[in-house]
Image (spheres, helix red, strand yellow):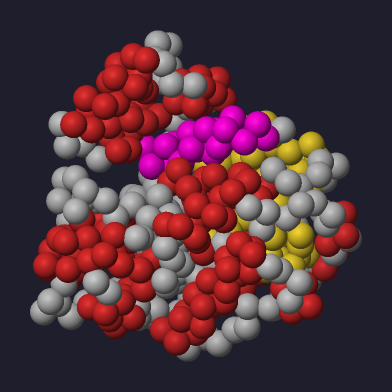
Amino acid sequence: MKLALTVAEFNPLHNGHKYLLDVMRRGSDAVVVIMSGNFCQRGEAAVLDKYTRAAHAVKAGADIVFELPTVFSVAPAEIFAKGAIKLLSSLSGEKTLFFGTERGEKPDFELLAESTVNESKEFKAALKRELSEGHPYVLARVNALKETTLGADFDILDNPNSVLGLEYCRAIKAFGAQMDISPVLRTNPHDGLSLEGETCSALAVRRAVADKATKKIKKFVPPFVYEQLPESLPRFDEVALYGVLRSTAAELKDVEDCTEGLENRIKALSGGVNTFAELIDKLETRRYTRARLQRIVTSNALGIKRSLVDKCLKSDLYLKVLAVAEDKKELLSELSGGKNKLLTRKADADKLGGAALACFEKDSFACDVYSLISGSVHSNYEMKRITR
């Protein structure tokens, strides 16, 4: 069976995502998505709950949607990618990973991935020097690559989706996964706010929701998405800020990517702020990016510690089915049997133990927190069957 795979957030799904799913459909037997749950990689609560977004994905062309566990979905790009590839690689079939990119072709990604997985002495030395100069790790690695790798399209490294695509390729090589790649050129900038042409970014859609101006983006999302856009974004401020105020610096230090004494800066500046955005405004510097800070604060609020993330990366987990197309429900049996068991009901989750159980409990907690901040109550044991 030919599986077309993608890692997504669909926060929310727009016409550009629909185009990607259309491309994946060509020549494949099944279109498989692994999608962030209720909290996303930028450390933000999703615009719509995970079941609604998974249903939108199926209506737009996906056959089955799995949840990327929360321990990975709010992690830095490298862990986000590793978690997704770890789970997708356990599926049986001829697998090809599709991902959107601002630029670059398959050989470019493979060359850069090889250079970073099998690090040369020159690369290690350049990386160490860049880090010593105070550059964030991602930027330091980009600069080291540019200095030590020949023949690659380095402009790839200046674009968010392309960098994430590179992390997928690195994860494929690191895990020795039997998986091909297929970069798909995006038709709009990842973080662009333009509302011209046929597509816009998910950020532009989220901004329109925040500004209560959803009519402006009506043509950029499928009708079934537009009809379910919320009147406002989920209010995560109180939960996020309470988490920081409650935590000690030592507890913050145990959160993934909270290094270099950043926990002390967070504690020192967390008093007297009223919103999540206000806190991030105070914390942000050239070295400490907004997305990184948001991930740390959100992970802390959800109680996700570095030790659990590490354990989950090293352990067999599960593939939680969020939604499946009614006309493709046979995939539930065809894709089962791997080392990461499919979860479709409570009885499946009740059989989990060890790291898998701890991981699922974080998903359940994140689901409850999202219900609290959005008012859309869901159980973590649901699975949607979608007629399209």
Q: State how many labels appear.
A: 0
Q: Name the one closer to the observer, 265 or 388.
A: 265
Provide the residue span drawn in magenta.
159-177
* 244 shown above or below 283: below
Q: Is residue 176 magenta?
A: yes
The reply to whether residue 185 is in sight is no
Q: Is residue 341 left or right of residue 308?
A: right
Identify the main secondary structure in magenta: helix
Which quadrant of the rendered structure holds the C terminus?
bottom right
Q: Name the one closer to the observer, 149 or 262.
A: 262
Where does the image place residue 375, in percent across and percent down from the top left?
47, 88
Where does the image place residue 70, in percent across and percent down from the top left?
51, 64
Q: Which residue is depicted at the point 79% across and 78% down? A: 347
Q: Is residue 60 left or right of residue 45?
A: right
Q: Quadrant of residue 173?
A: top right
Q: Which residue is depicted at the point 29% across and 60% down? A: 253
Where does the image place residue 13, in percent across and percent down from the top left?
53, 61
Q: Quadrant of residue 146?
A: top left
Which quadrant of the rendered structure holds the N terminus?
top right
* 134 shown above or below 273: above
Q: Name the one closer to the observer, 184 or 258.
A: 258
The reply to whether residue 339 is in sight is yes
Q: Is residue 289 magenta?
A: no
Q: Which residue is depicted at the point 62% across and 36% down? A: 175
Q: Which residue is depicted at the point 76% across and 72% down? A: 351
